[in-house]
Image (spheres, rainbow, N blue to C red):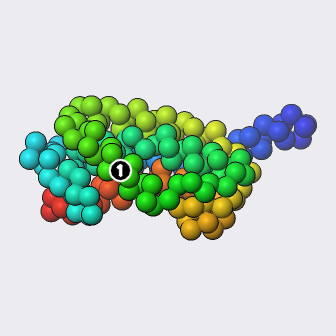
Amino acid sequence: MSSQTTATHKIKGSIGRRAELLADRIEEGAAGLAAFAEGLSEVDWSTPVSGSDRRPVGVTVHHVASVYPIEVDLARAIASGKAVTDVTWEVVAQLNGKHAQENAGVTKAAALELLRRNSREAAAAVRAFTDEELDRAAPFSLSFGAPVTAQFVIEDHALRHSWHHLARIRTVLGR
């Protein structure tokens, strides 16, 4: 094999494959949430979801959509080896409360458009991660300062988020 063939093989091989799979799962989760939300009535859309803040379904869908950029930025920080120390669960709760107030009347069309756009952009950003970046670990305040990998941050936040909220929405709506 020539060095050029070897380099091409590496690019098509393991380099980027994990990132591609992670991105695909982000898109799959967002598509599942969007497909479910498409069929909701106005009553369903305004039904409070269980939890401490009791956000309506529609606000919850918009919330998932709106935090993709933040979740990807956190993964990028960890991928660069930078400790994330200023994002606590208290800060998250404050941001979620502010988001709920500011978006209380969000329409289904607006939430779904944002969900589709931001999940697509998040997936594209994740596809750009190298295996080395995915494997890099740094202290992460949402994991109580544990040194976690960028892949973990992607999986536990950008990827899991839509699945988590879809399960909660299905439960509250009895579906």
Q: Residues within 10 Å of mark 1 (few under 14, many from 20)?
A: some
Q: Is residue 49 left or right of residue 91?
A: left
User: At 45% across and 61% down in the image, what residue appears?
Assistant: 89
Q: Nearer the viewer, residue 53 or 162?
A: 53
Q: Nearer the viewer, residue 147 or 169?
A: 147
Q: Is residue 166 left or right of residue 159?
A: left
Q: Residue furthest right?
A: 2
User: At 69% across and 59% down in the image, what residue appears?
Assistant: 137
In the rendering, at what x and y percent does residue 6 appear?
Answer: 84, 41
Q: Is residue 149 left or right of residue 37?
A: right
User: At 28% across and 38% down in the image, what residue appears?
Assistant: 102
In the image, residue 44 above or below residue 7: below
User: At 22% across and 57% down in the image, what residue appears?
Assistant: 54
Q: Secondary structure at mark 1?
A: helix
Q: Residue furthest left?
A: 43
In the rendering, at what x and y percent does residue 95 appear?
Answer: 39, 48
Which residue is under mark 1? Answer: 96
Disc 1 marks a residue whose amino acid type is Asn
Q: Is residue 134 left or right of residue 170?
A: right
Is residue 21 visible to us here?
no
Residue 11 figure quarter: top right
Total labels drawn? 1
Is residue 93 visible to us here?
yes
In the rendering, at what x and y percent does residue 1 appear?
Answer: 89, 41
Quarter of the figure with the C terminus: bottom left
Residue 169 figure quarter: bottom left
